[in-house]
Image (cartoon, rainbow, N blue to C red):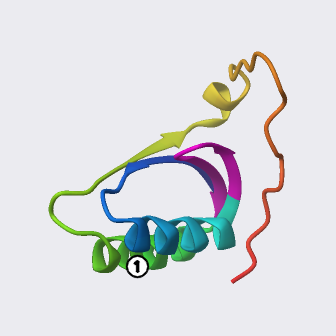
Amino acid sequence: MVRLVITYDIRKDKIRNKLFRLLERYGAWKQYSVFELEITPVHRIELFHSITDLIEDSDRVRIYELCERCQGKITEFGEVSPDKMHVVI
C-alpha cells in the first residue's frame, strides 16, 4: 500500500466537484482541498490517469507520497480530521 496526500486548486466548480468525488472514492477528505489516501500501486496508476484526464491545463494538483517514517510524524491541531481510509472503487 502507498499513502498519498493530494492537494488541488481547480478553477471550475464542475471539475473541482468531479475531482472531489473521485478522490473521495479512494481515501479520506482531510481539509478543504486536501485528501489522504492509502491505495495499492495499481489504484495509484488508475487514479493518476483519471486525474490527468479530468483536469485542465490551468488547474493544479500536487501529490505527496508519505513514507512510513513520515506518517508517524504527522501532527494535527484543532478539530481532528476524518480518518476514513478505505478504497471504495
Farthest residue, direction bottom: 89
Q: Can residue 23 be seen at all in this image of the molecule?
A: yes
Q: What stretch is highlighted in magenta?
A: 28-39
Q: In which quarter of the image is residue 57?
A: bottom left
Q: In this view, does 63 lie above or below 59?
A: above
Q: How many labels does the image show?
A: 1
Q: Which residue is drawn at 72% across and 18% down?
A: 75
Q: Can residue 1 be seen at all in this image of the molecule?
A: no
Is 12 or 68 nearer to us in this picture? 12
Q: In this view, does 59 lie above or below 87?
A: above
Percent of width and height locating residue 45: 43, 73
Tell me the kind of residue under disc 1.
Ser
Residue 10 left/right relative to 73: left
Percent of width and height locating residue 41: 54, 68
- Secondary structure, mark 1, is helix
Q: Label 1 belongs to which residue?
A: 50
Is 39 or 6 nearer to us in this picture? 6
Residue 26 left/right relative to 81: left
Q: Which residue is drawn at 42% across and 74% down?
A: 14
Assign the magenta stretch its main secondary structure: strand
Viewport quadrant of the N terminus: bottom right
Percent of width and height locating residue 88: 75, 78
Asked if the stretch drawn in magenta spans residue 75, the answer is: no
